Structure formats: C-alpha cells, structure tokens
Image: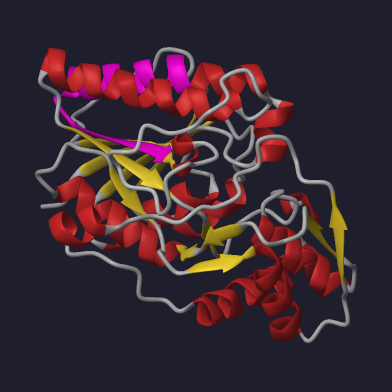
Amino acid sequence: MGQRVVITGAAGFIGSHLAEALLDRGDSVVGIDNLSTGDAANLAHLAGRDFRFVRHDVSSYIDLGGPVDAVLHWASPASPIDYLERPIPTLKVGALGTHNALGLAKAKQATFVLASTSEVYGDPLEHPQTESYWGNVNPIGPRGVYDEAKRFAEAMTTAYRRYHGLDTKIVRIFNTYGPRMRVRDGRAVPNFIAQALRGEDLTVYGDGTQTRSFCYVSDLVDGILRLMRSDTNDPVNLGNPTETTVAGIAEQIIRLTGSSSRIVHEPLPVDDPKVRQPDIGRARKVLDWEPRVPLAEGLTETISWFRTALGGNEQRE
C-alpha cells in the first residue's frame, strides 16, 4: 500500500520530479504551490494519476483533510533572480512556510523532509563542505534573504524534532540541473544552454574560475527518497562531488549544442561563492547513495528539453 505524500512547491523544477517519482512507486501525492515561481505545466503530465493539486501559499495556514504519511517542504524561490526580486516572500516561506508545513506534519504525525541548500554554507572557508561545517554567510548581504531563510528553516525543523519528537530529515541540495528548469532561471546551466541555443554569447560572471558541482535531477530525487525512508535525522548533503569551473561548464555546453557562441565576462555578483563541492560521505554511508549520471549525459538530456521549451513555450521563460 502506497503512502500519501504532500509536496509543497510541487510545481517547481525539483518538486515536479519528486511528485512523478513518488507516483511511479505507487504513492498518492498532494502538490501544493502558489505558482509564484513554479509552473503548472510541470505537472500537466500527471493528470489522471493519483495526484491532487492545491493552489495555496504555504506562508498561510495549511488546511488539508485526511491522513498524510510524509510532508516534503520544497516551497521557496531558489534562483538568485527570484529571491533577489522577492526577498520578503523568500524569508516568509523559509520561516512561516516551514512553520506551517511542520505544523501539518505534526498534526498528521508524518515524516517531514526539508529542502535545505548548500547556500547554508555561504562562501565557504571549508572545502569540500561537510555537514558539520557551520558556514560563512553574510546575513545582511543580498543573498542573505535565501541563505538565512534556509538556515532558520533548518533550526525550526530541528526544534520540532527535539521538542515534539517529529521524524524530520534535512537535505542540503547542491547545484542540480535537468529538464523543467525555467529558461530564464538565472542559474548557470539554464542560462548557458538558453544562450547557446539562441546563438548568443554566454555570460560568465567573474573570471569563470569559481567552481560548482552539478548533479542531475534523477540522481538527486533518488537520494531524497532514500533519505525520506531512512532512520537518520542529521542533515545530509546531496550533490555531485565532481567539481568543475563555471567557465568549463560553459565551454562544454557550447560543444554539446554545436553553438558558435563565445564566452563574455561580467562582474561577479556580491557574495557569490568561489567554491562549491559537497562531501557526500554521510550520504554514501547512511543512504548507500551516490550520483550516477555523467555530466555530459545529463547535459545532453537537458539541452534536448530546452530545445523544445525554446521552440514553443515562451511562458516557461
């Protein structure tokens, strides 16, 4: 018998992939999203399955009837473009939204899984980043609205576990990419792919030597589902430990798209991390997990999806 799972932020990039994976394993899914950054088109292919969509802002009280086995809290702007344009809603969903989602989980005695982020490490002084690292975050910098919202969400999630005995999980997600990312998402992979497919110059911020570690979305979802079923309550990094420079990923996308685009450089944004690489030792040990999709393979799939998105669905931009 499958479980009944609630996903906040279900119409987003990762949320929609989670919904699909849960349905594929026989679960019932309730997706909640206010569509501020999500796209209902990401869920259209789930019509006719055991999926129910509720349009709602989780920064307001969540009222949902019936039993719930797990609450996956994915609601939040996630790209710099979004949280810099929506600083206060980002803080509210990290605080009030997390409180309401935890309240739902407590009322239903459900497992709670928080989508946290590698951004809790800020511009890290430890490399690679382990879960025991407390981070180097500027709380009043422009990125602080996202970083501190997630750090607060982790603190509240942990308080619910300690005070109420709730079964909680925290996943710290590192750079993830794949189909259903928005064309104008603002992050490196969708930016570069869209620019390359249009024949535009690829915009690299800074000198391009800053590093990122890119995980394909199917690998991430596999890790999240393993974490949801696990006994661990400690934060777990999920990401691909293979590190690449931002300029290197731009060059690879130019090759894979066959584009004639060039790379141009713009100033580095304030507090942009210089390095980003997960230590996934804990995920390997407690979840028996590690990413399997090579970067070139994942990029090829993502490029194919973007060709279609750019060809006839401008609302995804």
Q: Residue at x 39, y 55 (%)?
A: 278
Viewer-side residue, 106 vs 213: 213
Q: Residue at x 49, y 42 (%)?
A: 124
Viewer-side residue, 276 vs 201: 276
Q: Where does the image place residue 136, in percent across and percent down from the top left?
A: 49, 32
Q: Residue at x 30, y 61 (%)?
A: 222
Dividing the picture into quadrants, the one containing residue 34 is top right
Dividing the picture into quadrants, the one containing residue 21 is bottom left
Q: Where does the image place residue 82, in percent across and percent down from the top left?
A: 68, 35
Magenta region: which residues?
94-116
Viewer-side residue, 265 vs 227: 265
Question: Position of 191 compared to 179: left or right?
Answer: right
Q: Residue at x 54, y 45 (%)?
A: 12
Above-or-below relation of 300 to 82: below
Q: Where does the image place residue 185, in percent across and percent down from the top left?
A: 69, 49
Q: Main secondary structure of the magenta part?
A: helix
Above-or-below relation of 307 to 207: below
Numbered marks: total: 0
Task: Find out whether residue 114 is within the magenta segment.
Answer: yes
Q: Is residue 34 visible?
A: yes
Dividing the picture into quadrants, the one containing residue 157 is top left
Question: Position of 183 compared to 43: left or right?
Answer: right
Q: Where does the image place residue 286, in percent across and percent down from the top left?
A: 14, 55
Viewer-side residue, 5 vs 113: 113
Q: Residue furthest front?
A: 125
Q: Is residue 7 visible?
A: no
What coloring was used for the rendering?
secondary structure
Task: Find out whether residue 210 is within the magenta segment.
Answer: no
